[in-house]
Image: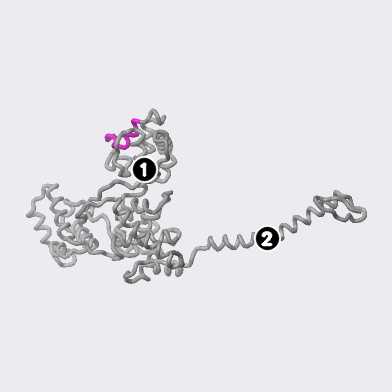
Amino acid sequence: MFDRVGSGFVALPMGESPQKTASRILLRHRLVAILLVMPAVLAGCVRQRTQEAPPRPAQVRAQIVRLMPAGVTDRDGWAADIQVAFSSQQIAPTPSNLCSVLAVAEQESGFQVDPVVPGLAEIARREIDRRAAAKHVPGFLVDAALWLKSPDGRRYSERLRAARTEKQLSGIFQDFIGMVPLGRRLFGDFNPVHTGGPMQVSIAFAEAHARDYPYPVDGSIRHEVFSRRGGVYFGVMHLLGYPVDYPQPLYRFADFNAGWYSSRNAAFQHAVSLASGIPLALDGDLLRPDAGLGDPAGATELAVRSLAARLDLSESAIHRDLERGDSRDFADSRLYVRVFALAEKIERKPLPRAVLPGITLHSPKITRKLTTAWFATRVDQRWQRCMARTRQAKGQP
């Protein structure tokens, strides 16, 4: 006896109903389907485990050595410190991330742990004289203080003339502040050397993010910043230790120079300017850096206030959202979303969510006009060359 099941004909065992036969055949088909797809599922699981497994430290170090530009000395030492910085901060050692760190280190120091700064002694003496003048301290008192012997047996003036690196200069100021009464009057507890090390990291940033530092601290975090391991660790954190949605690393490089989220905030200022018609400096500072409670609002806040009715936000709500400008969640705030919606409606086109900050760099070490955009572009060029070495290693054009 035969009966139709599905699209074919099957034999019915004696005494078995067509419904029971159909159930049996359906179960058999399901079992066959499971057996057919099982190898693919297992292979997918294997691939997933392979992707999730982190590379071994030795593999990461070998990759870093291959990506370094020619001429770097102690390549293995650099690779070890960079690998530890990535693993301890749980940052993926992708070619893009590794090349980003290598590009910044090359730009900032040429892979010198404590790079020489031309004319540093003269720069330091001018800073001392400038502060003395601001405090109305006579020059002869400054000369007398510098004539005193420092803890290493040399006079402060001798050490100052011999200073060639920021590490040496920072040590002089630390001793001067701690040992000479005039030093504390001129500088308080504030060492005027703000950055240091092979990636020129802010010492204040390092001190604020030292909780999980993976090495024993040699004296102080300030001292660690001037070491290769410390400079690299905090440099990696400052460059890659915060989440962003930038379309390319160029904007991270700008943030490294101008501060976290500066490129995103500059894009926000651009949108505010388009919506309000008020020209703004696209510097990434949404609030006045030196503003205290009750101080007048800055240019960006005033421009946003002019849009308050169209944004349906009060001045206090605007200020609260602007206070989130140094965090990731500012991009989720009502202010951010509504400003871009308004500006894009006016412009009738999408607006960028990242813009290079328009900041002119100021430092006693800088002798020509430089900008954050210049810095970011130079680093990006080095990153591009590093990524080209990655492709060459893989045999890609």
Give the residue type at disc 1: Ala
Q: Nearer the viewer, residue 60 or 380?
A: 380
From this viewpoint, is residue 220 visible? no
List the single residue furthest toward the front. 397
Residue 87 located left or right of residue 276: right
**Dot 2, crowdedness within 10 Å: few (<14), some or many (≥20)?**
few
**Exactly how many numbered labels are in the figure?**
2
Residue 360 located left or right of residue 97: left
The residue at 44%/66% (across/down) is 60
Per the image, label 2 sits on a secondary structure element best described as: helix
The residue that disc 1 covers is 267
Q: CA distance from mark 1 to mark 2?
A: 49 Å
The residue that disc 2 covers is 38
Span of residues in magenta: 293-306
From this viewpoint, is residue 125 visible? yes
Q: Nearer the viewer, residue 136 or 364?
A: 364
Q: In the image, is residue 294 part of the stretch drawn in magenta? A: yes
Give the residue type at disc 2: Met
Q: Nearer the viewer, residue 370 or 105?
A: 370
